[in-house]
Amino acid sequence: MDKKRNHTNKFQFVVDATDWSAHAGKLSTPHGVVETPAFVPVGTQATVKSLSPDDLENVNTQLVLANTYHLYLQPGPEAINRLGGLHQMMRWDKPLMTDSGGFQVFSLGWALEHDVGKLVSIFADDSREEVSVREYEKKGKALIKREKLCVVDDEGATFRSHLDGTLHRWTAEKSMDVQHILGADLVFALDECTSPVHDEAYTRLSMKRSHLWEERSLVRFKELNKKSEQSIYSIVQGGPFEKLRKKSAQFVAGKDFFGTGIGGALVSKSKMGEILDWIMPIVPENRPNHLLGIGDVDDVFLGVDKGIDTFDCAFPTRIARRGDLLMMPEDGGTCANHWRLHITRHEFRDDPAPICRSCHCELCQSTYSRGYINHLFWARELLAYRLATIHNLWVMNMLFTEIREGIASHSLNRVRERWMG
Amino acid sequence: MDKKRNHTNKFQFVVDATDWSAHAGKLSTPHGVVETPAFVPVGTQATVKSLSPDDLENVNTQLVLANTYHLYLQPGPEAINRLGGLHQMMRWDKPLMTDSGGFQVFSLGWALEHDVGKLVSIFADDSREEVSVREYEKKGKALIKREKLCVVDDEGATFRSHLDGTLHRWTAEKSMDVQHILGADLVFALDECTSPVHDEAYTRLSMKRSHLWEERSLVRFKELNKKSEQSIYSIVQGGPFEKLRKKSAQFVAGKDFFGTGIGGALVSKSKMGEILDWIMPIVPENRPNHLLGIGDVDDVFLGVDKGIDTFDCAFPTRIARRGDLLMMPEDGGTCANHWRLHITRHEFRDDPAPICRSCHCELCQSTYSRGYINHLFWARELLAYRLATIHNLWVMNMLFTEIREGIASHSLNRVRERWMG
């Protein structure tokens, strides 16, 4: 087992159990230990939307991801520094990770130009549907046109703030400097995320650029982190191309990163299993593996099977705010209904039943009825968003508890069957 | 003291202490006892915006007011009935009151026609200022014109739903029927609220109409409440006219109501003291007095001095959601700053100090900084609204605790001086 261990001064990753290629382990940080596999909710603006830090603890959250790009713009690193860093500012004294801003460079650049990705709520009729711009246009609804807000060169990216249009320069060094001030336990090297519309030639060019940025990130990170208060993850890119993915995995394996991040799996979801099959045999076994932006139940099982240790995703919290409640298998959650109950449906208007009988979250263990939650959503009452978010994170964390126990007892198959049917 | 006691089967109001004309007492209901004077937060749509019932308890809320008009439209009395009534639906098992819909008849009718009242967020630039339409037009901003949505006749009111434009008929009997289904402990008779623009002639006509409606309310209430699960308050109207106010006070005194409500003080705030001086010597001493829609700190002291026992007001929760935090005197709250700190001001952007050192609410007792709360408001994060609401209700309830203790120890003057300066 000694091989599967990575530790620096204050960080350590140990694999305790395996079930085929799936790991269960412990990721230790200066702010505590994360039992893996683990789900990582997204706290974009230094808060997981609608929840307090106490709420997060009550639903068994172990690790939170905050977005560096958003916090760089608002309230800015100077303010965060004066407020004692991100942990102290947001009153979260457990493990914390920040991304590099690379995905936002993609969102503001290629994603807008290529009309890919989930672009929510930028439409003229204020629809809350989560569809790609392409799908949206097919439906014939009016779309508020946006210009590309970011251009990339070999040195870095130049973008306009989505808040006030001001011009900013983003480089590997800048990302590291900002992430150092934020002070999360785990940080990411800067990469460029490509779009599925890109051909192999551009994806190769972009991957090489990402590798240069990651090397520069590592150099700056080491200069800044003499006391080892933070650890850094690489990011494997290469789009849907086998050769490139393998090359990228070899590159990050040869560099002195603490963990391995896998990017770009989001934009080619159907190929995710194949991509992981190319990468996972190459990346170092003793490093924790983080899959960026993935959090659907079926994708989680796929990722865990391939050896992923942590998953961040905004989806359980985002769908909560539009009334999609995650259901455990014993309460009717299945692959076919995407483990969701849409509480705003008319049939629940006067339903006195609880949301989910087997869930132990605050929403389900209290005597809140489906009818009342339906009412709160229709009335657009703020309480609805908080209760639904509490519920969804509780279910996600329950899923991961079952997965960890399944791996420890070599019965992950049974857990998978229970959820996937 | 026996004189100052009113009780039915399950309801009782007892005055324990007096300090000049101010009372401290206990209002007993089937769902518990309210220590008076008490502040009553408004849960318009069966939830005090952004708070859970546990939050409400944690800030020492004793009694909540829900709005019958809003709940009649959404989710509707049939749904509420099937969800077990309002207490069970909203998981609030403490005392609850509902209004009659009379104020909404005014809001949808005369208030729109006369451009009076605080009309928030109906303006073209989405301003969150709380000013009257008249003040607004003076500022030269664009106003979205609205048509009057309600017309009143002697029998009742006909209104269009502000939600979907459907036509509804509202009468004393209807209000009582709906309030009976909602099942709050304390209900109000239906009245018509006049506007300060109305002359004495119309106000007299309207007052007589209110008296007819209140008599009919009482008849229907008694038919419905054979088991005395609810108690009913009258409403004194009469605008700013001494003769009419006295006549209205005499009218309600002569009828078999449990409590006395005082309406229309909101729309002539400057005359409030005078109006109470006309009314209070006439209304029965043994009934609890409720002042509708009043909740500014200075108005509370005025009301308590005149013998008011309970006050409902949406203001502490509404201003919380725009970042106005109520301040205790020792933290800088004064008459001049309206006991408010506007947390979104730039100076708080990187302020690591707590909101209010002497407050014991969840927001202030945790290590949340002014800088973080400022950030949450600028980032429009939902957590901001909940924390600010918790804080403001805590301060309001602290004010009322001090007032009750002041009356009990005959030192209300000292409490007033502390807050009013």
Image: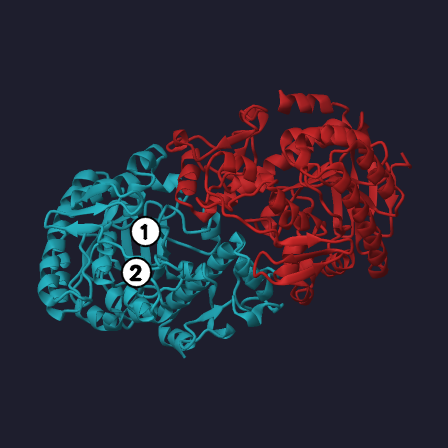
Chain colours: A cyan, B red
Q: Is residue A111 toward the left or the right of residue B101 in the image?
A: left
Give the quarter of the image for residue A196: bottom left
Label annotation for residue A28: 1
Query: Residue A209: x and y, percent?
Result: 11, 54
Q: Is residue B175 toward the left or the right of residue B226 in the image?
A: left
Q: Amino acid at mark 1?
A: Ser
* Residue labelled with disc 2: A293
Query: Residue B150: x and y, percent?
Result: 65, 53
Q: Is residue A421 above or below residue A22?
A: below
Q: Is residue A232 above or below residue B367?
A: below
Question: Which of the image's four quarters has the C terminus of chain A?
Answer: bottom left
Residue closer to the observer: A99 or B289: B289
Mark 2 residue element: loop
- Pinpoint the chain carrying mark 1: A
Q: Going 40% across and 58% down the picture, which residue do you hit?
A: A126
Question: Which badge, 1 or 2, comes first in the chain's sequence?
Answer: 1
Q: Amino acid at mark 2?
A: Gly
Q: Going 22% across and 68% down the picture, which residue do you hit?
A: A276
Is residue A44 visible in the rendered image? The answer is yes
Q: Are marks 1 and 2 in contact (CB under 8 Å)?
A: no
Give the quarter of the image for residue A30: top left
Query: Residue A31: x and y, percent?
Result: 35, 46
